[in-house]
Image: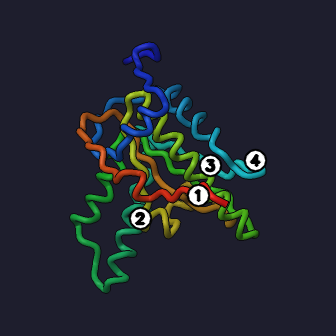
Amino acid sequence: MPTATDRPIADALTAIKSRRSLKEYLQTEIPKEWIEELLDAAHWAPNHKLTHPWRFHVFSGAGREKLVAVRQASVRWAAEKKGEPASEEALKFARDKCFSAPVLIIVSMVGDEKKITDQENYAACWCAIENLLVAANARGLGSYPSTGDWIDQNFVGPVLGLTEKERPVACIFLGYSEQQAMAKRLPVDKHTTWYTQA
């Protein structure tokens, strides 16, 4: 197993610009302390009034089996909305997805009755997710954040033990990857307006 000294570390701008969503992973185990490092990077994200709204739920090894039933339940729910049964292929895909990466991290958030605070907390969670994704890339790991019905409709809530004030935000797939990804971004000047005069 690699040690901490074997790991690469990219500078911040390189890690940001080279990060891409990768969906093909090796099943190589990731040491717990490496995951803890990424979670630590995540929780340094900006959050207004230091609400620390994020919660991290880490699934690896046999623990990923806990996600299969809820992911398949969301597939059945989506099929029923269309008035059709869930196909065996779709159910198998849902199961396989839970084991497609060696580590799955579900990020949930503590909501707030105040709309503006709730929006700030949600934004803070995505800042934390981006921190984790960039840190993973800097350390030579692939990742991607995912949502979908099983997250958006809170099928995972019972597995995570979420209270009524909490809701899931995204699932991060994490692992070593040999998948090649190309950078695809428009020039930033297409989205920038400069104000230099009063």
Furthest residue toward top = 5
Q: CA distance from mark 1 to mark 4?
A: 31 Å
Q: Is residue 182 left or right of residue 167?
A: left
Q: Which mark is residue 134?
A: none
Q: CB of mark 4 within 8 Å of CB of mark 2?
A: no
Q: Which residue is mark 1?
A: 195
Residue at the image position 67 percent from the left and 60 percent from the top:
198
Residue type at the position of mark 3:
Arg
Residue type at the position of mark 4:
Leu
Furthest residue toward front = 197
Label 4: element kind:
helix
Q: Nearer the viewer, residue 55 or 184?
A: 184
Vertical order, 36 against 98 (above or below): above
Observer-side mark, 1 or 3, equals 1
Observer-side mark, 4 or 2, equals 4
Q: Is residue 119 left or right of residue 24?
A: right
Q: CA distance from mark 4 to mark 2?
A: 28 Å
Q: CA distance from mark 3 to mark 4?
A: 14 Å
Q: Position of residue 177 (x, y in %)?
A: 29, 35
Q: Position of residue 194 (x, y in %)?
A: 54, 56
The answer to whether residue 9 is visible is yes
Observer-side mark, 3 or 4, equals 4
